[in-house]
Image: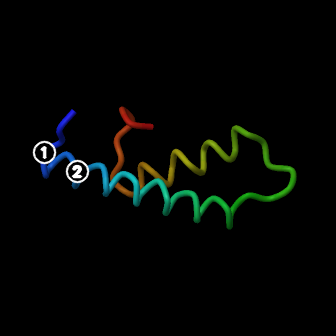
Amino acid sequence: MIYSNEEIEKLIASSKLANDCYEYICNEIKVGMTEKEVASLIDNYFLSHGASRSII
């Protein structure tokens, strides 16, 4: 598969967003949190940083 420049830019941006979310979550996870609570933090992070539900 050959990617266009636009597709490569989108892949880079989505990778950066995922990495930034990982760093955020690592600082927010606390002992006793449920999986649902962590998933909600992740979901809210992505949505508040411009992601759409279709990629979450």
Identity of the residue furthest to the front in this view: 1
The residue lying at 49 percent from left, 59 percent from top is 19
At 79% from the left and 59% from the top, the residue drawn is 30
Q: Residues within 10 Å of mark 2 (few under 14, many from 20)?
A: few
Separation of residues labelled 1 and 2 (CA atoms): 6 Å
Question: What percent of the width, then of the height, locates residue 48?
Answer: 41, 55
Camera-side residue of 27 and 37:
27
- Which image quadrant is residue 17 in? bottom left
> What's the residue type where badge 2 is placed?
Ile
Q: Taking 20 as reference, is 29 left or right? A: right
Q: Quadrant of the N terminus?
A: top left
Proximity of marks 1 and 2: CB atoms separated by less than 8 Å? yes
24 sits to left or right of 16: right
Which kind of residue does numbered mark 1 sit on? Ser
View extreme (right): residue: 32
Q: Which residue has dot 2 on it?
A: 8
User: For the C terminus, which image quadrant?
Assistant: top left
- Name the element at disc 1: loop
Return the x and y of residue 51 as percentages of the image width and height: 36, 47
**Quick one: SS at disc 2?**
helix
Residue drawn at (31%, 56%) of the image? 12
- Relative to the observer, which residue lies in front, 8 or 14? 8
Q: Where is residue 7 shown, x and y percent of the image? A: 19, 45
Residue corresponding to mark 1: 4
Q: How many residues crowd around disc 1 within 10 Å: few (fewer than 14), some, or many (20 or more)?
A: few
Q: Residue at x 80, y 49 (%)?
A: 33
Tell me which colouring the rendered structure shows: rainbow
Q: Up-down: is 31 above or below 56?
A: below
